[in-house]
Image: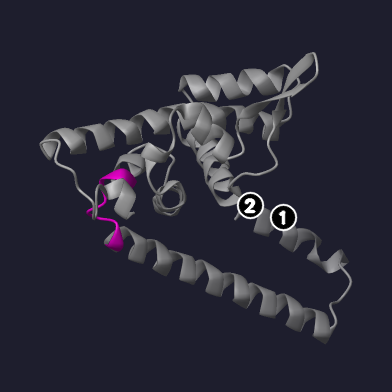
Amino acid sequence: RTIIQELRKVISSFPSMTAPMAMMIGSGAEQIGLFKRREVEITKLLEEITQGNAAVQALRSMRGIGTITSTTMVAEIIDIRCFAREDSLACYSGLGLLEHSTGDTMRMIHTEMFNHRLKDAFMTAARNYVHFNPDSHLAGYCRNLVKKGMSPLEAYKRVARALVRVIYKKLTSLVESDTHTSGGEDRTEGESDMASG
């Protein structure tokens, strides 16, 4: 409201808008409104579909991780048992480093082959987690990195890497508890909520 009130004070100094430009802006605004309504519909649908999915619900319980981000993570990871350790998941999502050796020298490099959708989901989760949990140690970690001169994007990437560790443990414990409750039986179809996600 304050912004609108201030704009009304200076609106008379703006040049008048041509009809084609006004139509383009109006059309763009309608498209944005449509996309926002569709996003709400998709979110509601995903919430209904994933009500019984323990993996999605576990991620959604983390403050700052919403329906779309949690379902994207579960859909892209497919089965956490595919990853021997958290470093494997970090590399798969483009947030880890790989050993690269040439002769006598060995260094850590970022891999160019990774799941871009999963990386986007982790980066979104990192930004939202810092925003919605300002008193958490990860939010403090992010603020300190920026204060020391690191770019916000790189700082969020470090938070995303830390979230990989947290989410890996959370999903692994879900699979382990699912195995214990099923009595250790070998289940080939619908092995877990993670696998059937």
Above or below, 25 against 10 in this view is below
Observer-nearest of 61 and 108: 108
Badge 1 crowding class, 10 Å Cα cut-off, few under 14, some 14 to 19, many 20 or more, is: few
- Highlighted range, magenta: 49-56
Q: Quadrant of the N terminus?
A: bottom right
Q: Is residue 32 left or right of residue 149?
A: left
- Hey, which quadrant is residue 98 in on the image? top right
- Hey, which quadrant is residue 41 in on the image? bottom left
Judging from the image, what secondary structure is the residue with disc 2 in?
Answer: helix
Q: Name the residue at 46% across, 22% down.
A: 135
Q: Quadrant of the C terminus?
A: bottom left
Please indicate, yes or no, whether residue 2 appears anywhere in the rendered image.
Answer: yes
Residue 129 magenta: no
Judging from the image, what secondary structure is the residue with disc 1 in?
Answer: helix
Residue at the disc numbered 2: 2
Observer-nearest of 23 and 38: 38
Q: Is residue 184 left or right of residue 130?
A: left
Residue 55 magenta: yes
Observer-nearest of 83 and 37: 83
Above or below, 147 against 116 in this view is above
Q: Which mark is residue 151?
A: none
Residue at the disc numbered 1: 6
Q: Name the residue at 73% across, 63% down.
A: 8
Question: Which amino acid does the dot numbered 2 rest on?
Answer: Thr
Q: CA distance from mark 1 to mark 2?
A: 6 Å
Question: Which amino acid does the dot numbered 1 rest on?
Answer: Glu
Badge 2 crowding class, 10 Å Cα cut-off, few under 14, some 14 to 19, many 20 or more, is: few
Whether tag 1 and tag 2 are in contact, CB under 8 A, the answer is yes
Above or below, 153 against 16 in this view is above
Q: Name the residue at 70% across, 19% down.
A: 147
